[in-house]
Amino acid sequence: MTYGSEVSREVSFLRDFRDHIVLNSYAGQRFYAAFNAFYYSWSPGVAQYILEHPWLKAPVRVLLYPLLGSLLVASYVALPVVHLNPEAGVYLAGTVASALIGLFYLLPILLLIAYIAIRRERNISIRREVFTAVLALPLVTLAAALVFQALSIDFAVTIATSSYVLSTIAASAVASARMLSKLILK
């Protein structure tokens, strides 16, 4: 989904945003230290597999469109803030991207699980304490990232920013699933 594809201009914009904005921020550098280690541990193998099985290109491309859209929206939302405070802009971009990724990728899975449970007449409600913890975790990890960043503790910022992204993905999906299930089951 890069050079010569119908979204090459968007991908180029995102690369530029990453290279010139995100990676020029402390939080962005620390997040990418973890992200790159994770991503490049499996991505080359997957890319090779897709190359060897061309029929997979179209389905994978469709699966990547929501990711591309999420990153574009996050970048556009963050750009005005980046000019005022690059670190805040990068955190904002990460927050928006993570929340949208949770909605596009994790929420459908949660809704499918809920649908199957309802069809089997099982109650899968989340206890209030667990729900509250899932929603609080992004705030806790964001606060930790900011404290560790103020103290310039690289390894801790790497863990905290990664935890913030993952917890925001989970929180957006869980909160949306709960809201949708309440609307549907009324």
Image (spheres, grey):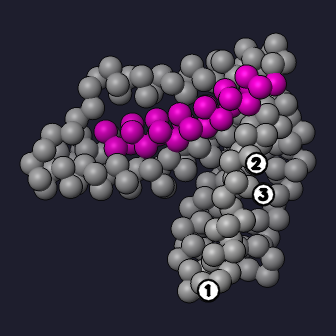
3 lies above or below 98: below
- Residue 167, magenta (yes or no): yes
Q: Position of residue 133 (x, y in %)?
A: 42, 22
Q: Position of residue 136 (x, y in %)?
A: 48, 22
* Label 2 packing within 10 angstroms: few (<14), some (14-19), many (20+): few
Look at the image and give the residue range highlighted in magenta.
Answer: 154-178
Residue located beneath label 1 in the image: 54
Camera-near label (3 vs 1) is 1
- Say which residue appears at 34% left-offset and 25% top-offset: 130
In the displayed structure image, the side of residue 63 where residue 2 appears, left or right: right
Q: Amino acid at mark 1?
A: Pro
- Say which residue appears at 61% left-offset and 31% top-offset: 164
| Residue 14: assigned label | 3
Which secondary structure dominates the residues rendered in magenta? helix
**Disc 3, SS:** helix
* Residue 34 visible in the picture: yes
164 lies above or below 66: above
* Label 3 packing within 10 angstroms: few (<14), some (14-19), many (20+): some
Q: Amino acid at mark 3?
A: Leu
Q: Position of residue 20 (x, y in %)?
A: 90, 48
| Residue 36: assigned label | 2
In the displayed structure image, the side of residue 72 where residue 154 appears, left or right: right
**Disc 1, SS:** helix
